[in-house]
Image (cartoon, helix red, strand yellow):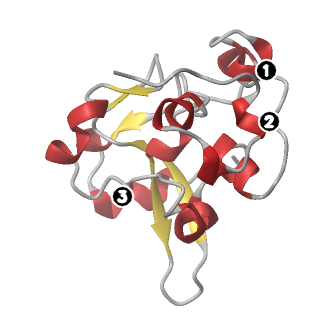
């Protein structure tokens, strides 16, 4: 059974969120499901428009979230304990990264706006512009690097 959401829980330190609150912090943008290229020589990170095979490009949600690690073992587990290690590759608009950095959520975030579609209307999601990874060979991902920041 899931735990109740406390009023304005998103303003609490991440380590104080219960599991239901942690999950509710996700804005549903789908950006974390984009494949990234990390250049070993520079450490530079490039986001591509190539999405995880489980991402639904319209809803911007994982089609198999609860069992995703069975299909994508390398899918990163966001937790309060791992956020410090992975925040560098999360998009700047990510609620987890923002809260980790002590910043407020943007007005379009569903917890602020009260509307899960606000993230899409604000142009902050990947809706409609990704390609599934099974259509693009990994050696061609560089051809799909985004030329705009996330």
List x then y, in percent, for residue 56.
37, 24
Q: How many marks?
A: 3
In the image, what residue occupies the spot 30% across and 46% down?
A: 136
* Residue found at the very far left of the displayed protein: 70
What separation in Å lies between label 1 and label 2 (alpha carbons)?
A: 7 Å
Up/down of 54 relative to 97, above or below = above
Question: Toward the viewer: 75 or 122?
Answer: 75
Secondary-structure class at tag 1: helix
The residue drawn where x is 82% and y is 32% is 106
Is there CB contact under 8 Å for labels 1 and 2?
yes
Q: What residue is rendered at 31% in x and 64% in y?
A: 139
x then y, percent, for residue 36: 47, 59
Q: Is 119 in front, or is 3? A: 3
**Residue sitting at the far bottom:** 41
Q: Which mark is residue 105?
A: 2
Q: Which residue is mark 1?
A: 112
Circles 3 and 1, Cβ within 8 Å, touching? The answer is no
Cα–Cα span, label 3 and label 2: 35 Å
Residue 59 vs residue 147, the one in the foreground = 59
Q: How far is disc 3 from disc 1 in space, using C-alphas? A: 38 Å
10 Å neighbourhood of mark 1: few (<14), some, or many (≥20)? some
Earlier residue among tags 3 and 2: 2
Residue 141 position within the rendered picture, expressed as x and y whole percent measured from the top left = 40, 56
Q: Which residue is mark 3?
A: 140
62 to 44, vertically: above or below: above
């Amino acid at each position: 059974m899931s735990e109740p959401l406390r009023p304005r829980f998103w303003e609490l330190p991440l380590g104080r969120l219960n599991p239901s609150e942690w999950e509710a912090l996700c804005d549903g943008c789908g950006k974390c499901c984009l494949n990234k290229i990390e250049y070993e020589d520079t450490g530079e990170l490039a986001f591509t428009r190539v999405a995880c095979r489980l991402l639904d490009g319209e809803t911007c949600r994982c089609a198999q979230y609860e069992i995703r690690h069975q299909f994508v073992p390398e899918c990163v587990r966001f937790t309060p304990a791992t956020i410090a290690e992975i925040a560098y590759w999360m998009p700047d608009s990510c609620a987890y990264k923002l809260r980790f950095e002590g910043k407020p959520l943007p007005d379009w975030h569903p917890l602020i706006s009260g509307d899960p579609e606000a993230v899409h209307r604000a142009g902050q999601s990947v809706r409609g512009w990704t390609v599934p990874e099974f259509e693009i060979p990994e050696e061609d991902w560089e051809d799909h690097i985004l030329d705009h920041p996330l």
